[in-house]
Image (cartoon, rainbow, N blue to C red):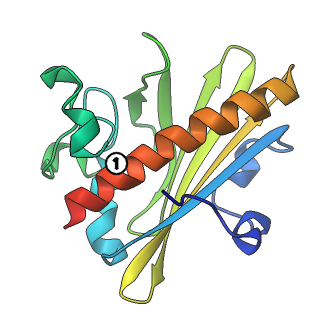
């Protein structure tokens, strides 16, 4: 599963970069789906714990208890995000993301605090031929153990985004 941002994509500014600046750790991912941004947007807007869930491919979801599986349809209750909306996160019982900026169908930015660390997560959609390039950027600061965050964080980020990309592609078919 290819979920790498290009060098050019990593170098360019994104919505929300100013929310955690300067960042100690930046993780960029990118993947392409065969649907226009307007079709991809609602699927990304409804992501989240106690919402549509976190998309995974069907072969992986079969291993999860039914209550932990993500929706395979759009639910209008979850597709209209507003700045200030708080979305529960899987990181822990009290972990959340807050919507910091929303520009349908182009970009969505979340912020969070994990202990002393500020986090921003931006999702940017760009037309790519007949499909969409989905760009994700995670920014963290301050980070005490930068090498550890980069190594383990990169692995975890890759695994979760690769799973989400595969699950999203299935849902868009």
Q: Position of residue 53 (x, y in %)?
A: 28, 35
| Looking at the image, residue 130 lies above or below residue 9 | below
The one nearer the camera, 158 or 97, is 158
Q: Nearer the viewer, residue 136 or 82?
A: 136
Marks counted in the figure total 1
* Pointer 1 local density, CA inside 10 Å: few below 14, some 14–19, many at least 20: some
Please, what secondary structure does the residue beneath circle 1 have?
Answer: loop
- Residue at 22% x, 37% y is 70
Where, by quadrant of the figure, is residue 61 drawn? top left
Q: Could you say where residue 7 lies in the image, as x and y percent from the top left? A: 76, 69
Which one is nearer the viewer's eye here, 34 or 24? 34
Q: Residue at x 59, y 29 (%)?
A: 112
Q: Is residue 105 left or right of residue 46?
A: right
Q: Position of residue 73 (x, y in %)?
A: 12, 51
In this picture, is 8 found above or below 83? below
Q: Which residue is mark 1?
A: 81
Instruction: Name the image quarter holding the C terminus.
Output: bottom left
Residue sitting at x 31%, y 43%: 55
Foreground residue among 114 and 159: 159
Where 86 falls versus 37 (above or below)?
A: above
> Percent x, y for residue 113?
63, 23
Residue at the bottom extreme? Answer: 129
Compared across the picture, whether 115 is left or right of 53 comes to right
Quadrant of the rendered structure where residue 141 is?
top right
Seen in the image, is 170 located left or right of residue 152?
left
Residue with the most extreme top position: 93
């Amino acid at each position: 599963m290819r979920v790498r941002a290009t060098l050019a994509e990593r170098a360019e500014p994104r919505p929300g970069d100013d929310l955690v600046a300067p960042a100690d750790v930046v993780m960029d991912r990118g993947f392409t789906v065969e649907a226009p941004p307007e079709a991809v947007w609602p699927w990304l807007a409804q992501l989240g714990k106690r919402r549509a869930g976190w998309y995974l491919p069907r072969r992986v979801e079969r291993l999860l208890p039914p209550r932990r599986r993500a929706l395979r349809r759009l639910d209008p209750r979850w597709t209209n995000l507003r700045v200030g909306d708080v979305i529960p996160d899987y990181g822990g019982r009290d972990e959340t993301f807050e919507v910091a900026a929303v520009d349908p169908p182009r970009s969505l930015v979340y912020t969070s605090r994990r202990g002393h660390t500020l986090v921003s997560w931006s999702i940017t959609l760009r037309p790519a031929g007949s499909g969409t390039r989905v760009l994700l950027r995670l920014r963290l600061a301050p980070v005490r153990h930068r090498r550890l965050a980069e190594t383990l964080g990169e692995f975890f980020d890759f695994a979760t985004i690769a799973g989400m990309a595969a699950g999203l592609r299935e849902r868009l078919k």
